[in-house]
Image (tube, grey):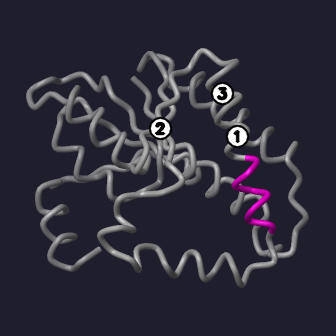
Amino acid sequence: MIIVDLNQISISNLMAQIGNHTNAKIEESLVRHMVLNTLRSIKTKFQEYGEMIIACDAKHCWRRDAFPYYKANRKKSREQSELDWPMIFDTLNKIKEELREFFPYRVIQVDGAEADDVIGTLVLMNGKMLSVNKEILIVSGDKDFAQLQRFSNVAQYDPVKKKFVTCTNPDTFLKEHILKGY
């Protein structure tokens, strides 16, 4: 199973494409091309992992209810940016619906949850402690997924850096992140 963090790969890919051009005019067709091309590339490159599942963020996340300042700096940065973020997010939502309707991928979005929650749940349901085969591939540059590598059948690939992300001690990684408040 290939689990793709749709927002993470889409936005990081977009930022890599525009580079320092913070006032670049971004068009819907460009974003659609980038997302679809990235998904095609992932599916082709990692076909041995099987079915591709697209994990999506819901518009409202439970973390904001529990922690009002959750990702507040990102929102502030977007407001100060010259990029048309409402258009970017509207386009990503359109693409998500198109993927759901026209493509052979399962698109999972849970009200109140982020893609991270969906990915974590899928891995917890399908992770194996003693398996030697890598059957689950998480496609995301999000370092928080390192903790899921405690399951021996889980691998992670960062499509922007074009390399696998490895964690030698996932339990220590998790404890450090909890203690440091990351």
Q: Which callout, 2 or 3, points to the residue nearer the camera? A: 2
For the C terminus, give its image quadrant.
bottom left
Task: Report the span colored magenta.
Answer: 84-91
How far separated are the C-alphas under marks 2 and 3?
Answer: 12 Å
- Secondary structure that dominates the magenta span: helix
Q: Residue at x 49, y 44 (%)?
A: 5
Q: Residue at x 73, y 34 (%)?
A: 37
Instruction: Quickly name the residue at label 3.
Output: 99
Q: Badge 1 local density, few (<14 within 10 Å), some, or many (20+)? A: many
Image spot of residue 45 (x, y percent):
56, 26
How far separated are the C-alphas under marks 2 and 1?
Answer: 17 Å
Instruction: Quickly name the residue at label 1.
Output: 35
Q: Which callout, 2 or 1, points to the residue nearer the camera? A: 2
Q: Are marks 2 and 1 in contact (CB under 8 Å)?
A: no
Q: Quadrant of residue 12?
A: bottom right
| Mark 1: amino acid | Val
Label 2 SS: strand
